[in-house]
Amino acid sequence: MKSLARFSVRRRWLVLVIWIVLIIGVNVVAQSVGSAYSNSFSLPGTNSTSALHLLERGFPHQSGDADQIVFHARSGQLSSDASTITPVLSTIAALPEVGKVSPISYARDGSIGYVTVTFIKQANLLNTKDVQAVVDAAAKLRSGTLQVDFGGNAFGQLSSPKGSPGEGVGLLLTAVVLFLAFGSLWAMLLPLGVALFAIGIASGTTTLLSHGLSIASFAPILGSLIGLGVGIDYALFIVTRARQNLRQGKGVEESIITAVNTSGRAVLFAGATVCVALLGMLVLGFSFLNGLGVAAALTVLITMLASLTLLPALLGFQKHRVLSRRERRQLAADGPEPEVVEGGWQRWAAFVSRRPKTLSLLAIVAIVLIALPVFSLNLGISDQGSDPAGSTTRVAYDLLAQGFGPGSNGPLSVVGDIHSSADVAVMHSLATALHGAPDVATVGPVILNATHTVALLVVTPKSSPQSTTTSALINSIRTHYVPTATSTTHTAIFVGGARALSDDFSHILDSKIPLFLVVIVLLGCLLLMVAFRSILIPLVAAAMNLLAVGASFGLVVAVFQWGWGSSLIGSGTGPIESYLPIIMIAILFGLSMDYQVFLVSRMHEEWVNTKDNELAITRGQANTGRVISAAALIMICVFFSFAFGGQRIIAEFGIGLGGAVLLDAFILRTILVPALMHYIGKANWWMPTWLDRVVPHVAVEAGD
């Protein structure tokens, strides 16, 4: 690390030019080839996928995305506008990518109606211009008496916000926190600049990767969220240590090299743990998550490399200007400051050392209370009923529910594989049975394709697509009604539709969470064991990470499922995205490990020097308390700012990650971890002799 730091400082112009060429080159290439992001995922062998494949085979023009154009007569009957609407619908039916446009269906009161526009492809495969052409044609019907709105995935993608409007506010708040922490404009700009530089490169690289991997469209925003958080944090730790070295009288080059060789090692190790946690998603064998994991890990890797090379070069340019004017005057007048930190954090660390049992109990109770909502977690894929109030998709959703019942927003497709007249009879028998099923509002007629090889039965639930009652109905059709109807013929019948697909997705991911937890907990423990030559420290860290995950999920459920404060960020209530737990666990384990590494590495450094457990923990906490709290405030500002971007999934990440960092930094690492380590005593640093010989020796914090 010393050699890398020395090279970066002495050849700082070369390092700066390399990074500038890199950011320009990557983004020029990315702009020239464009992106190929895709929200598609495959669920081979599932019931809903089998239904979709049958639809594609039997009804190719009805197997694409089914969206709704909703009409509302503000006064009188909608039928009076039929003569105006019908010609426009004929025009829409002839547009590219449109497979079919249904006749108008009217609500009982006659004021609301809708048509279903069935595209020939799924929403993520459609050309935006073709979808916009449908909207433009129908929007011409809007008048003072006729309201026209659009619902469905394809139309929803048109209004999906690009980027995060709250990101600028988050960066402004971050700049304020950095300025208050450093008192120097130049020192404030360094972490921000390095993080933004790294994100610029990571964003272009992710765009290029999208041509080879299946990467979700929200991956760049998620990457920015993670990159800003960890990038500013990593730079903050190194800049803080360099400033501390300068105040203690060391020269500029020595201060930077020592900072990289100490805090930089912790950054390297912390970044590696984040990458390992994110890449742990690869063991699940899910292409949708593979792309997200690789893209996020790449972002962390680039920010880590920028912190270890670009940042030392920039520090070399700044020299003593990273200190405030007051600090420079004080250094000149009074000489170097002492190594032992005095002040509020020293007093707090001493207070924790005196009351470890009481503080541990209070911290655990607080975290458990915050985590309690997780027991009502409802996983699924939130639909447009959770879109911001007033958006065209939300208005269309509410109008359909008002006029035709909540289930009209998510009808189920019951699809049968037909080989004989007996199979057709089974479909009719099933339709009759479903007429009397609980939570079934309507059952459409059995529709056969032209070759009589596939039959379609549309079932509309009474409950909304996001309701757990709808999931129960899907399960009941699959496990009771279909087996009963096919007991003699064994006709292959499957249940599809958006909610059925999301349920299958959720069940697959739920089954993989235990394996994922075991993998990343084991890998995290092994890394910490190598770093700190300890058995108990990795186990304590794993327990802390699980508490942080539980508390963050509790916050997400309370806000996005229960609706506590959701109106403040313009989000409706609904199920939590089924892929959120896997991604959140990966990110949170990585971020939690960051704070654990930064805190315990300083304690370990003191332990190696003094062999006094109490002194090592107290000094380690006192020396890192201020920088960890500042880093946490920065992450909180960044993460919470993404909650106001209008994208529900990004808002869930923002609230979950921001809340987790808040609890992690100010309860777990500030109170619970040091309190437990005081209570455990010298056993913190124990490792069996035989294991110590086997485990490779890697120093996280080298001595000065």
Image (spheres, helix red, strand yellow):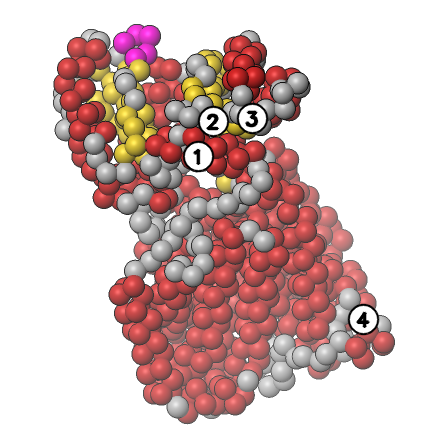
The alpha-carbon separation of the residues under discs 3 and 4 comes to 60 Å
Magenta extent: 106-110
Q: Residue at x 27, y 17 (%)?
A: 104
Q: Amino acid at mark 2?
A: Thr
User: Of the residues shown, which amino acid type is indicated by label 3?
Assistant: Ile
Which numbered mark, 1 or 2, is in the foreground of this view?
Answer: 2
**Considering only order in the chain, which callout, 3 or 2, is on the residue closer to the N terminus?**
2
Q: Position of residue 89 (x, y in %)?
A: 21, 25
Asked if residue 302 lies left or right of residue 25, the reply is right
Spatial separation of the CA atoms under disc 1 and disc 3: 14 Å
Q: CB atoms at circles 1 and 3 under 8 Å apart?
A: no
Q: Position of residue 304 (x, y in %)?
A: 48, 72
Give whichever of discs 1 and 3 has the lower sequence position: 1
Question: Residue at label 4?
Answer: 686
Distance of label 2 from label 4 (alpha carbons): 69 Å
Disc 2: CA contacts within 10 A as few (<14), some (14-19) or many (>=20): some
Quadrant of the image containing the C terminus: bottom right
Q: CA distance from mark 2 to mark 3?
A: 12 Å
Q: Which residue is mark 1?
A: 57
